[in-house]
Amino acid sequence: MTTQWNDSQPIYWQLKERTIAMILDGTLAEGDTLPSVRTVASEFQLNPITVSKSYQTLVDDGLVEKRRGLGMFVRQGARQQLMETERQKFLTEEWPAMINRIGQLGLDLTELLQTASEKENKS
């Protein structure tokens, strides 16, 4: 994780979003232990309460479970749950905004898709 924080959202929320991204990309697999609150707080120079609040939101969302004396673990099914909710969020919030922006710029969606396909084939 990088230590760049922006002022548009609370840090605990940004930390939560970064943890979600790590679960989605497989950096944190189901069953993996999350770094301890103290480790994260020390590494990123954060208040431990901020890290605890972030982790608690992950517990509340059913993505992480606390095991007394052992730490926090990514729950089984967390990645699939995230895939479903993040896809829905993309389709209802982000995609309409992108379509609107494409229209504002007078871009052709078919041409954009073709460009993306060509770029993917070069990779």
Image (spheres, rainbow, N blue to C red):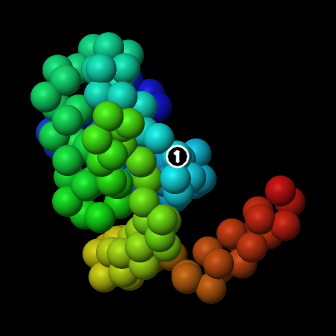
User: Residue at the location (23% across, 20% down)?
Assistant: 46
- Camera-side residue of 32 and 114: 32
User: Residue at the location (55% across, 81% down)?
Assistant: 108
Residue neighbourhood size for the residue with mark 1, other residues' Cα within 10 Å, grouped as few (<14), some (14–19), many (≥20): some
Q: Disc 1 on helix, strand or loop?
A: loop
- Camera-side residue of 78 and 12: 78
> Where does label 1 land, which residue?
32
Q: Is residue 52 visible?
A: yes
User: In the rendered image, which quarter contains the C terminus?
Assistant: bottom right
Residue 97, by quadrant, is bottom left
- Residue 79's x, y, as percent? 49, 65
User: Residue at the location (41% across, 73% down)?
Assistant: 81
- Residue type beneath disc 1: Asp
Up-down: is 44 above or below 28?
A: above
- Residue 15's x, y, as percent? 30, 39
- Residue 89's x, y, as percent? 33, 75
